[in-house]
Amino acid sequence: MTTKKTDSSLGSNGRRKPKLAVWKFASCDGCQLSLLDCEDELLAVAAEVEIANFPEASREVIKGPYDLSLVEGSITTPHDAERIHQVRKESKFLMTIGACATSGGVQALRNFSDVKDFVSIVYASPEYISTLKHSTAIDDHVAVDFELRGCPINKMQLVEAISAILNGRKPNIPTHSLCMECKRKGVPCVMVTQDTPCLGPITQAGCGALCPAYDRGCYGCFGSMETPNTCALSEQWNKMGVSQVDIVRALRTFNAYAEEFRTESIKRAERT
Amino acid sequence: MSAIKSNKTSGTKTIKVDYLARVEGEGSLFVKVKGGAVKDVKLKIFEPPRFFEAFLRGRDFREAPDITARICGICPIAYLLGSSQAMEDACGVQVAGPLRDLRRLIYCGEWIESHALHIYMLHAPDFLGYQDAIRMAQDHPEYVKRGLRLKKIGNAIMEVIGGREIHPVNLKIGGFYKAPTKKELNTLVEELKWGVDAALETVKWVATFPFPDFEQDYEFVALRHPDEYAITEGRLISNKGIDAPIKEYDHHLIEEQVAHSTSLHTKVRDRGACFLGPLARYSLNFDKLSPLAQETAKEVGLGQVCANPFKSIIVRAVELLYVYEESLRLIQNYETPDRPALEITPRPGKGYGATEAPRGICYHRYTIDEKGTIMDAKIVSPTAVNQPTIENDLRNYIPSNLDLPDDQLQWQCEQAVRNYDPCISCSTHFLKLNIEREA
């Protein structure tokens, strides 16, 4: 088998294409899969950028520096805490994608416990496991140029962010609450009409208000909106009969270590 | 860096692939050859552990589906559904009728998405000599475009029923939050019809690829259902004598520590490694495939049993054809259920659930208390079970290929790993792994 060579480094205008790299840390792979899930846009994106380092999709590894790095996953091992600095050094623009990279992800649930207990529950030989006490977001370690939220990210937001960055403009990604998106879609409020607890009022929009559209409360997979009133929402849930334990559980899922969710869940946990 | 090093004086050759490409997750490969014999094979997993079984303890049983879905972005249905069924088993409830059909339909969506991704984007480039599908698209745009369209339809099924293709929001214990209408499902029909033809063409296309002669004596393990090609449930069976309900999984498939690695490897009790996934399903359940899928398989020269892992790409294409037909059938017969989910009241006990993820059986076992709080969780992903089989393949495949130039030998080894469509993100959350790294 011989490699077939084609020059993929030049764009349609004959200029050098920007180099794109995709990096993975602790994660489920879903956010980088979103790029491959852009079935209609993938070949168009590939025509505008040179996919220089994307192991999930390609054997080819083209050396850095890279014009744009997409970083998926959180930092959970000593080795990854070093590796992310190397990624930063090689990247002109670094965008984190998804709840793991932007808040530590579901694996940050260890941050509220003793990770040693976790290791011994799962592993027979804990001495072989190299792990950090906390799972942390990428921006706890290096400067991040743009964050794309979601568990998983919305692929249309991904396409928007990539094209904005490559064209030197600010990505058009709103930071308001899910409620705005829900109202715009004309979905009746599930808190008001169905008495269903919903994290929408404190969660950033972006998913398309999916859960309320499917008759369930938002579970906060896009993390907190800009300046959320978490306390007021918890009080409202209380009034609806939700226990403190269940409020803590709701705040501690995929963005458990995002600052606003974390602070509120710690406050509520103290009252249980 | 990936490399092959040859040492002429000692006669050793090592193949090191530090970061396996076109697999989901982070893994590496280490092979040591001396004097024509393979001395050591290690498929290493260095994906960081995420401790799902640990943090599930103390969570409410209703949270398990959404939480475990995050084990894998490629096959979330395997986790959403496996955990739901295990909880239903613990609570003594069985989901049947249109809700069960709807589960099967969304699972068909996941198979379509995952199989089309693997056939076209991850595996075909190996056979045609490209680094990836995007570079392949420059010479063969028609194939890559067909693959993307086939894949997109799988995602469309997931989206219509589940809300989105990755970590869909509409599944829960007992069924769904909201059942789709027949009209909503009917929007998929035209594309699905195109997909049946395109999947048929896919089988014929991949069957023309060059395959090495490499048949192995595997113990195939898969689910089997009396009325259908098993996807969402079935008995655990094998070609070497297993035939048991899923609650006896732990009795038949046991994990043991092996000397060369700190990984826990799954073995069949009193025997050895086993093989999960498309080849196993096909070889054990050929009679349950649709007439068209059976005929097409015969037409391209596949027997009723296929024991050549390189031909898994053809088998995956046959399964792709089957799930396209099956999706159409399910939509045709669908009537909106009276209610979207069954009521479930927790009771203390143990529950078991297993489904056929695109890569093979994904097993769940939970213990819950009277309030529904999770006391214990065990989840086994197919890639973890296949890991020793992948290593055996390399051990047996390399000796007859040592005369290949180094770069081609390395590529062949990678291809032998990709035969299994390994999903390393899945396997890691429980693997007893050695984080030792190659410099």
Image (cartoon, coloured by chain):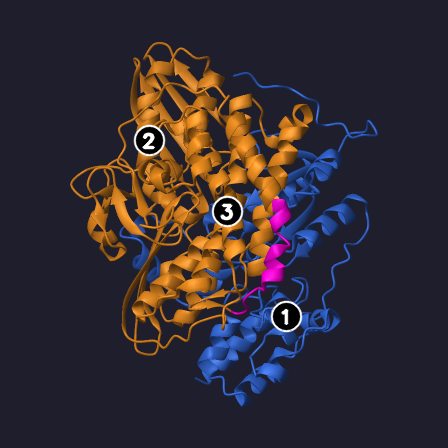
Chain colours: A blue, B orange
Q: Tell me where the magenta segment starts and ends, as one range.
A: B177-191
Residue at point 72% right, 47% down?
Answer: A162
Residue B91 screen position, x and y as percent = 32, 71
Could you tell which of marks 1 and 3 lies nearer the N-terminus?
3
**C-alpha gap between disc 3 and disc 2:** 44 Å
The amino acid on which the numbered mark 2 sits, given as a three-letter code, is Val
Q: Which residue is mark 3?
A: A80
Q: Examine the rendering and report whether any part of residue B358 can be seen.
A: yes
Chain under label 2? B
The amino acid on which the numbered mark 3 sits, given as a three-letter code, is Asp
Observer-nearest residue: B95 or B377?
Answer: B95
In the image, residue B219 sits, relative to residue B48, either above or below, namely above
Q: Which residue is mark 1?
A: A203
Q: Which residue is mark 2?
A: B305
Residue B58 screen position, x and y as percent = 37, 71
Secondary structure beneath dot 1 equals loop
Secondary structure beneath dot 3 equals helix
Q: Quarter of the image holding residue B199?
A: top right
As drawn, which residue projects farthest toward the right? Answer: A13
**C-alpha gap between disc 2 and disc 1:** 51 Å
The amino acid on which the numbered mark 1 sits, given as a three-letter code, is Thr
Q: Is residue B184 magenta?
A: yes
Q: Quarter of the image holding residue B394?
A: top left
Secondary structure beneath dot 2 equals loop
Local crowd size for mark 2, using a 10 Å CA cut-off: few (<14), some (14–19), many (≥20):
some
